[in-house]
Image (cartoon, rainbow, N blue to C red):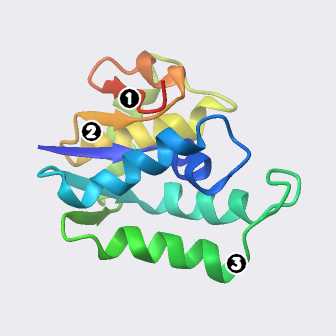
Amino acid sequence: MSYTVDVNILLYASDRTSPFHTAATEFLRRRPRDPDILCLTWPVAMAYVRLATHPRVFAQPLTPRAAVDNVAALMRMPRCRVVTEPEDFLTTYRLVAVDVPARGNLVPDAHLAALARAHGVGTIYTHDRDFRRFPFLRVVDPVV
């Protein structure tokens, strides 16, 4: 089995002022013991670096080094794999995004959902309810 994680969970774990900080941190601490494979995507990793270092997002933003180090720590986990867009990704994106329809702020969610579908990932851990629009994904909120 495999799963992916949305950027909001990573951000909550880094933001000590978030009401979801403790739950997100505990969720991430349990990942190395999880027998399933974490399929981390570059869009999520880079969104995390962008937002965690942004002073309008965090009252005390992370340094770029700290944010990248956090991504590297995830990538070092024994059952973490970085998944990328296959050559025929646009075909998968169309299948995922057209019926929703994905526009505006839903485009990054559709991108992540299409990456999951392209790699056979059936579960996403997120606090974002919009992922429920993609019927092939099992959406699990680890912070409630």
Tell me residue 23's x, y (percent).
Answer: 48, 39
The answer to whether 129 is drawn above or below residue 116 in the figure is: above
What residue is shown with label 2?
A: 117
Crowding around mark 1 (Cα neighbors within 10 Å: few <14, some 14 to 19, many 20+) is many
Nearer the observer, disc 2 or disc 1? Answer: 2
33 is higher (above) or lower (below) than 81: above
- Disc 1: which residue: 96
Task: Say what amino acid the circle numbered 1 marks.
Answer: Val
Q: Which residue is mark 3?
A: 64
Q: CA distance from mark 1 to mark 3?
A: 33 Å
The image shows a total of numbered marks equal to 3
Q: Residues within 10 Å of mark 3 (few under 14, many from 20)?
A: some
Mark 3 is on which residue type? Answer: Pro
Residue 136 versus residue 49: which sits nearer the camera? 49
Query: Disc 1 vs disc 3: which is toward the camera?
Result: 3
Instruction: Please report the residue visible at 22 percent of the width from the left and 34 percent of the height from the top.
Output: 122
Q: Element at badge 2?
A: helix
Horizontal placement of 77 versus 103: left or right? Answer: left
Q: Are marks 2 and 1 in contact (CB under 8 Å)?
A: yes
Residue depicted at 26% across the width and 23% down the height: 136
